[in-house]
Image: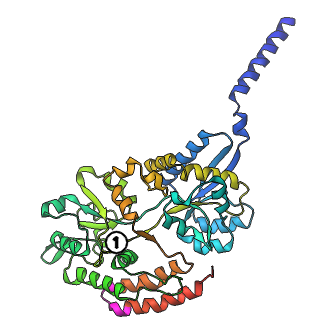
Amino acid sequence: MFRKLSKLSLLTLTLAMIFVNLRVPVAHAAAAQVTFWGDWTGDGATQIQTMVDAFNKSQSDIQVNYVPTQDIVTKFLTAATSGSAPDLLIWDRFRTALYAPKGVLMPIDDLMAASKISSADFYSEALRELTYGGKLYGLPMTVDTRALYYNKTMLDAAGIKPPTTWDELEQAAIKLTVRKDGKLQVAGVSLQDVGLFNMWLQQAGGKMVTDDGSKTAFNSPEGLSVLAYWDKLINQDKVYEIGFEQGLGQDQDAFVTGKVAMQFNGPWMLSTYKKYGKDLTFGVVPSPAGPKGNKGGVMGGFGLAIPTATTHSKEAWAFMTWWLAQPANSVLWAKTSLSIPGNLKAIADPFFQSDPYLKPFTDALKDAKIRPPFAGYPSMEGDALIPNLQLFVQGKQSAADTLKKAQQDGDQILTDNNIPQ
């Protein structure tokens, strides 16, 4: 009986030791749980998870949990008043001017000061897009702009160098355009996206709205010069036809298939185009300068923001700054996602400066401006300006009428949505 009890005790002790070894470490079990929402799914969610995993492994006090969330703004606004808000958000920066006044985002100015993080370490335009009423509401996670992609094989065959001005772009597009029996086979340059008007307008030396955001400013000599240039390319030089790319089929990228020789696009297309290898030899240069030498583009991108309703602001801030304020981690993010981070010290890394595809984008970002950070701007552009521009390129409306009508409708939208700062 005595020997049986000893075996039982030994078994009990052994099982206890195994249990202890299998338990989650105490520090991990006690870690603060940070709920992180974003609408990045698929490959994007995998890229985000890489950063989350790296942070979670770097320490044991905080456990970040990424939750892919569709219709994120609507769900966030509901959660912000129901006690179920996340602790951190991937935030489309242009929404800041619309939602910061609602009190759902936490200003981070005091956190910046306490952490001794300098705003000079980030793209100033990206920070401006995250600012409302003199307060900063997040840090930039990504920055992007458009650059000119060109089919290197086509340009080399035609003896053309990548264009650096509007005049050079026009002449290159003319030489690269191919027609057979009057039918367009290869477009010299894509002009399908009238939403790039802001980019063209900056290159012409103009601006979209007044400095205070109360009125539109595109109905100007500079705005008219953009439409005159488009008109010349489409209707006189005939280097493009509206609807040309849509007619190629949904699964056919016009640039990949050689139907478009040059196009404006963002860094998000680099990984896609690199996949085609032998079938597509391409290069990238910053967008050409306008007739007066002006350079420009539209800076877009995402940030990380902390909801006001969070119960873990300190922990969310720790993750945010680990990722976005530490250059090495920003470079890790870039290598993981091929996104351009908002951290300027990270941009100095050879990963960007030695890459013939990424460097043109970082060069272009030096001249890029954000969309004007006013509450009514997205609606003004989407509901007033773009529909009129579409009528213009379709030949259904004159340039003067296009900008006049867009101005009238746009001014009203800005007035209706104006939120005094």
What residue lies at 60% left-to-right and 75% top-to-bottom?
98
Q: Is 126 on the left-hand or right-hand side of 394? A: right
Q: Is residue 393 magenta?
A: yes
What residue lies at 59% left-to-right and 39% top-to-bottom?
57
Q: Which residue is mark 1?
A: 295
Q: Where is residue 197, by image quadrant?
A: bottom left
Which quadrant does the N terminus fall into?
top right
Q: Is 168 on the left-hand or right-hand side of 129? A: left
Chosen colour scheme: rainbow
Asked if residue 252 can be seen in this view, the reply is no
Give the x, y percent position of residue 188: 22, 71
Which of these two is toward me, 248 or 50? Answer: 50
Q: Where is residue 6, by image quadrant?
A: top right
Task: Please say if 263 is above or below 224.
Answer: above
What residue lies at 50% left-to-right and 82% top-to-bottom?
211
Which of these two is toward me, 398 or 131? Answer: 131
Asked if residue 295 can be seen in this view, the reply is yes
Give the x, y percent position of residue 23: 71, 31
Q: Is 260 on the left-hand or right-hand side of 2? A: left
Residues drawn in magenta: 392-401
SS under mark 1: loop
Mark count? 1
Which quadrant does the C terminus fall into?
bottom right
Task: Please say if 322 is above or below 293.
Answer: above
Give the x, y percent position of residue 97: 58, 74
Which of these two is toward me, 265 or 393? Answer: 265
Which of these two is toward me, 260 or 142? Answer: 142
Q: Is residue 25 magenta?
A: no
Crowd class of label 1 (few under 14; some 14 to 19; many from 20; radius 10 Å): many
Give the x, y percent position of residue 22: 68, 28
Q: What's the residue type where badge 1 is placed?
A: Lys
